[in-house]
Amino acid sequence: MTTGDHYFTAQPGTAPDRREIEFSAAGRDYSLVSAGGVFSAARLDPGTAVLLRKADLPAPGSSGPLLDLGCGYGPIACVLASEAPDATVWAVDVNERARELTGENAVRVGAAGRIRVAAPDEVPDDVTFAEIWSNPPIRIGKAELHTMLTRWLPRLTPDGVGWLVVGRHLGGDSLHRWLTEQGWQVERPASQKGYRVLRITR
């Protein structure tokens, strides 16, 4: 039965049902391909849109590495790679179809050589990140979400920064508190349309 597929399913059984997603970020227009069985398959997710609009995108001279955690079909990774043409961007997702789409979209934006698409266990342990970006999969549950962030946030470089977007009604404020309790410095530089943008540093 495929109706139970979620975007965090490793191999979605739903029909691909490919479609074009168009959006603008930082003055650039993007046209990416999406498909059923991945997160926000029919449009740019509103939370992702807020994150790309309100967070500080990497400077053009940034060399990274950067991480798009839970990349879906790759909108964040494609924007990061476009804004920082010297940076390597790791695009990580458990969903095989999402990874395939991100690879395809990396070609579309001319960043195939710099967007490294990977399953979580395929990222070498010694890679650390200047920036981690995520619209995290809140619906996997609080315990799983905390486990995911506990795994990846410590891989920030000493002066690295993490950017998360979380819906207020999906626990954005409680996640802010939890991150603070874990010893992270957390700021909320923006809120828009019910979403919290969180900036995380050591």
Image: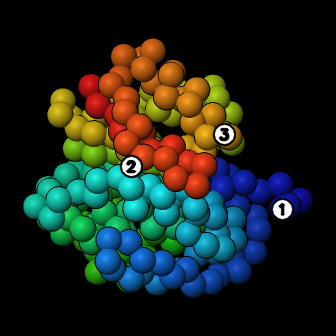
- Reading the image, the residue beneath label 2 is 133
Report x, y in % for residue 89. 29, 58
Q: Is residue 77 above or below residue 185?
A: below
The residue labelled by disc 1 is: 2
In the rendered view, does 201 fall on the left or right side of 121?
A: left
Mark 3 lies on residue: 170
Helix, strand, or loop for circle 3? Answer: helix
* 2 or 1: mark nearer the eye: 2
* Disc 2 residue type (three-letter): Trp
Mark 2 or mark 3, which is nearer to you? 3
Instruction: Judge from the rendering whether residue 60 lies leftward or rightward of residue 181; answer left or right.
Output: left
- Quarter of the picture containing the N terminus is bottom right
Q: Which secondary structure, mark 2?
A: strand
Report the residue that reaches farthest toward the right.
1
Position of 102 relative to 119 (above/below)? below
Choose top left, top right, bottom left or bottom right for residue 44: bottom right
